[in-house]
Image (tube, rainbow, N blue to C red):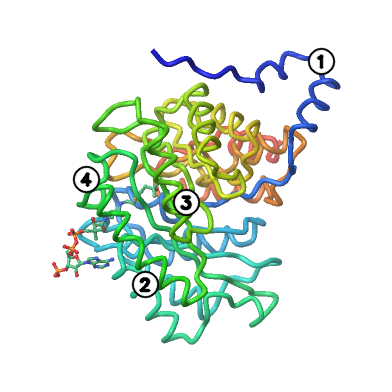
Amino acid sequence: MLTRPRLRFFTALRSPISTRRLATESRLASDHVRIVEVGPRDGLQNEKQSISMETKLDMIQRLAKTGVTTIEAGSFVPAKWVPQMASTSEICQKLLVSPPSAQHTIAYNYLVPNIKGLESLVKIMDETGVPADATGVDSKAATTTEISLFAAATEAFSKANTNCTIAESLERIKPIVALAKTRNIRVRGYVSVALGCPYEGPEVNPSTVADITASLLEMGADEVSVADTTGMGTAPRTMELLQALKAAGIANTDLALHFHDTYGQALVNTLVGLEHGIRIFDSSVGGLGGCPYSKGATGNVSTEDLIHTVHSLGMHTGVNLEEMSRIGSWISGELGRANDSRAGKATLGRLSG
Ligand SMILES: CC(C)(COP(=O)([O-])OP(=O)([O-])OC[C@H]1O[C@@H](n2cnc3c(N)ncnc32)[C@H](O)[C@@H]1OP(=O)([O-])[O-])[C@@H](O)C(=O)NCCC(=O)NCCSC(=O)C[C@@](C)(O)CC(=O)[O-]
């Protein structure tokens, strides 16, 4: 029977406001939280109905105006595996040639499952002549191009998601990172099913997650997003995982957290991450999402809810909640699905009086 770590954050919440604020502030290394908007990729990859390239591009263009600095724009995967991502090449080409106007540099990120995926991206970069770091090209439309690659914390999920073992997937990743580095492409790693696996259950070994995270960083990943793919994570198990990552010598600045909200625990787990010092969180506008290889998993934590929570703590994201809420409502309407963001709906309700 595992002894779960005690949660200091919730002790702090029971203190009077002024003490609480001071206690929280003293623990916060920085009060800026970077949001990685995964809606156009993780959010849309599991939608049953086909979504046009124009709608996806429109979504990305709207997101670029909210203040968010990293947007997952698609994935270079075989269409037979994830049909919804079939328009990624076209989207990538358009974002490189005429990036949406924005007041700041935006990193457009593409998921690649293997070297072939990265080669497809590099080919488009070569054809358009736009380098991975185009910040010097036009300050109004500055962009960078990033990739994400992924490994899983369980053998069963690794097999289902990438058709190979964990060890094989790490071998597969090495040349991808090497090629990315020669092209100045920033690399994000993902460790999926870190807090629960659809095939092996909720008790995923935190040391396995820490080992895989360390391997990805050693290979040259610039940050690793630890993902609760199934949403089975709880606050004590999130804390336990973060402690295992710390014990393995992994710096908080190298980590992001990626929560799905299947059991309604994503924001609770986010608070645990914030308390621990993590400052990068993935989320999806309107709470879109679900993983094709995790049956029943619902969307990511909604970006609107994440912004609202972070701002309520006196921290900042640089992302406009009202704009994000409008996008959540719009894209939900386009997809004919319910808007899964409570903060988004409440914000729009307040704005409409
Ligand atoms: C890794 C593979 C490709 C292995 O799939 P495989 O079938 O073993 O691949 P293969 O190397 O045997 O190739 C089979 C065919 O696919 C082609 N092919 C091969 N690679 C590519 C490519 N990149 N782009 C386009 N085509 C490709 C290849 O050329 C060949 O074509 P054929 O000769 O049959 O005509 C497959 O398992 C795969 O694509 N898996 C990814 C599935 C996926 O996208 N899952 C969802 C994303 S992960 C996720 O959502 C979790 C995350 C990240 O959000 C975090 C979280 O919450 O956990």
Report the amino acid beneath label 2.
Ser
Would residue 157 be found to the left or right of residue 298 on screen?
left
| Residue annotated with mark 4 | 160
> Residue at position x 36%, y 63% from top?
174
The disc, 4 or 3, on the residue closer to the chain's N-terminal end is: 3
**Residue denoted by label 2:** 89
Q: In which quarter of the image is the C terminus?
A: top right
Q: Distance between the residues labelled 4 and 3?
A: 22 Å
How packed is label 1: few (under 14 Cα within 10 Å), some, or many (20 or more)? few
Residue type marked 4: Ala
Q: Residue 16 carries which label?
A: 1
Classify mark 3: helix, strand or loop.
helix
If the picture is divided into quarters, which one holds ligand 1?
A: bottom left
Query: Badge 3 is on which residue?
Result: 39
Q: Nearer the viewer, mark 1 or mark 2?
A: 1
For label 3, the crowd category at 10 Å Cα-Cα, with few meaning under 14, some 14 to 19 and many 20 or more, is many
User: SS of the residue at dot 2?
Assistant: helix
| Three-letter amino acid code of the residue under disc 1 | Pro
Question: Residue type at mark 3?
Answer: Gly
Residue 24 % position (x, y): 76, 28
Q: Does the residue labelled 1 lie within 8 Å of ligand 1?
A: no
CA separation in Å, label 4 and label 1: 49 Å
Image quarter for residue 269?
A: top right
Helix or strand or loop: what does disc 4 sit on? helix
Q: Which of 18 and 5 is in front in this view?
A: 5
Q: Which of marks 1 and 2 is nearer the N terminus?
A: 1
Query: Which mark is in front, 4 or 3?
Result: 4
Which is closer to the viewer, label 2 or label 4? 4
